[in-house]
Image: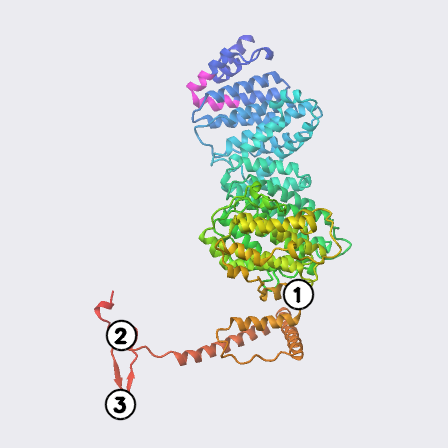
Amino acid sequence: MTGVCGCCGALRPRYKRLVDNIFPEDPEDGLVKANMEKLTFYALSAPEKLDRIGGYLSERLSRDVARHRYGYVCIAMEALDQLLMACHCQSINLFVESFLKMVRKLLESDKPSLQILGTNSFVKFANIEEDTPSYHRSYDFFVSRFSEMCHSSYEDPDIRTKIRMAGIKGLQGVVRKTVNDELQANIWDPQHMDKIVPSLLFNLQSGERTESRSPSPLQASEKEKESPVELTERCFRELLGRAAYGNIKNAVTPVLMHLDNHSLWEGKSFAVRCFKIIMYSIQSQHSHLVIQQLLGHLDANSKNSATVRAGIVEVLLEAAAIAASGSVGPTVLEVFNTLLRQLRLSVDYELTGSYDGSTNIGTKIIKAHEERQLQEAVIRTIGSFANTLPTYQRSEVMFFIMGKISVPGVHLALPSTSSGPEGTRMIQVMLLKSLVQVTAGYQTTNMLTALPTSFLEPLLSLSLTEDPEVRLLVLQILLSLIDRHENRPKFSNISSISDISVLKLKVDKCSRQDNLFMKKHGQQLYRHIYLGCKEQSSGRQHYESLFALLGLLSVELANEEVVVDLIRLTLALQDLALSTDEGLPVYNRCAVHALAAAYLNLICQLTTVPAFCQHIHEVIEVRQKEIPHLLPEDVFVDNPKLPSSLEKVEGDVLFLQSKITEVLGGSGYNTERLATPYVPQFTDEDRLSKRKSIGETISLQVEVESRNSPEKEERTPAEEITFETLKNAIVDSVGMEEQERERRRQVVEKFQKAPFEEIAAHCGARATLLQSKLNQIFEITIRPPPSPSGTISSGYGQSQNRSVPIYEMKFPDLCVY
């Protein structure tokens, strides 16, 4: 019987005998290396046998797995790995199929050791560059199985960690094997990305929890190389680094879904970490795609809780900071439009108390403080985006935001909100705060382009409103745009120091463009400074900002003419503080006096005229002795000690226009202009922005018309304006508005409720009428074209044009091509 078996064994194919010989009698002895070398040589010499070798090894491995002979399983996988590394012939595809079949068998096992063994073999295979393509190989099973291993919940924590790490390595191997091979199944398809990305994020998140419970820094550093978090992050970065332009969306969408499903936006830290990895890993030219996806996700969560929206906005803030300059993408204004829309929605939610504008029992209750935190986050994000933009794009964003601000009488860009006037005011404030963020750090060489009329006039109109917060924001915007040499912080405190050299001001020569700007807009700026000081609701911050504006105009945009006008303006402010007709409170009058003293102290030292400086310093010294509450050091403090009323402010404590005109005239300044008191020019802007009396408004209009008319002498006398005239004008205008509103309502109602046939007949009748009128016009205006063949005479001796078709006309040769 033994001889018969030996005879049959000799008749077996050679490749089977070579395969059998690599297995020792005791699996603990490991692979028989000498016989393995013979098998490798045979496979290289006869590559057509490679697929049979693989099939037989697969058969033996399946049998050993079923019999729990795990030692022989390890030997078989080792042999497969060596054959795979050694052979790169065209027949390797069939061998790979057998190899993947065996790996699949190991991964399907319940034994963690076999799963890890199969994963390690697959990783080795993934690092091999194949010479021949494969058209039919599928990795769907491996993506699913490795993703499942990443979520392992094995009882033993050490084994659980090993299984999860094996799953991560397996996914990394699948990505490496398929991402650059166009013939393979597209790993970027959503069906694969929806498994790979959440598996990686799950391990990143669970790794954060385990790191927070790590026993000691020394132990953590020893195991750092084996940490699942480090491995996961490396794999995630590699995946994103390989993503092309068209694959970014498929890679980022699962991240957004994972953060949604597990409520991870509210914590912010993990979401921010994920997108930091994304932004640093993808190619820089693709950064704007991620930002656009985040903006779209923000829009999709418009009715979610404020904490979720704030988390998305915080992630946007970090992403914008990481993105390179100009990488926000081609749709820059769309980015800001989305953020401003979220700002508007948040204001509406805060004021109405619900996401749908109603107060039903089933609606979510909105927390006002959470909405305010969201609004602050959106404003910070707008500033962060603006900082990544070049100057010309930042200018476009400034004009875009200004176009959305509701300016009284100029434009009502925003429709009336569901929350009423208070909502409109809050949105106005939020948009101005956004504009403050955009203009922060803005640098320009040409003020005419930085502050064009279309931008400056609405901005200055807002500075005339009664809301002190709006006026303060407008002043901050002006300061940011005018400050080009970082002088603004040096004017943060109002003082009357005797030597301004300690401020280290950067004064540059005024350019031609600056002169043109001040010639065009200087009077507007002076007038708004004057009216800003005149406001009863102005506080300490307003006066400090007004002083900074005066100072910046002096060092940034001042020529000799501007200096004269600023001095006249300051003396006019002193007269304003002396007047009792305006009804200013004592604090405001003292503050205006102190502001005038501080600015004259600054400008006299900038002009370097000794006599001018002497006069200013003498007045300041007298005030220090007699009435210190008219100096900035005593007024602009936390608890100013002011008298109950201002009386007998005269004599040596006042700056004298005659004296200043005299001393500056000796230095070449325009004495005639200096001697003329400054009087602000009132325009229609005041009527539109401020609530003035009807009498002032009408007299203002008549004055403006008479001043602007080029033919004053030939004009007929203006109609006498009486109380009855005004009353009738107001009643008529109100009645006309009501009629127009009713007519519009009827038209809308008709198109909403009327049957289609009636609407079609109505439109058809209008079209027919229009066509008939056009035909009449054409008959009157259009005549037959003149004929090249000349004219013919009618029977009555009159010449008559003869019309000839174009194809019968005879043209000169020069006119024919």
Q: In the rendered image, which quarter contains the N terminus?
A: top right
Type of amino acid at the residue the image marks with label 3? Gly
For the point 45% across and 77% down, which residue is it?
Answer: 774
* Mark 2: amino acid: Glu
Quarter assignment of residue 681: bottom right
Q: Label 2: which residue? A: 808
Nearer to us in this view, 753 or 213? 213
Residues tagged 2 and 3 counted as in contact (Cβ below 8 A):
no
Counting residues from the start of the chain, the first of labels 2 and 3 encountered is 3
Q: Main secondary structure of the magenta part?
A: helix
Camera-side mark, 2 or 3? 3
Question: What x and y, as percent, mark residue 640?
Answer: 72, 49
Q: Which residues are magenta?
A: 40-55
Q: Is residue 42 left or right of residue 364?
A: left
Q: Is residue 49 magenta?
A: yes
- Tag 3, which secondary structure? loop
Label 1 vs label 3, nearer the camera: 1
Residue occupied by mark 1: 691
Q: Under tag 1, what secondary structure?
A: loop
Mark 2, Cα crowd under 10 Å, few <14 / some 14-19 / many 20+, is few
Q: Give residue 797's mark.
A: 3
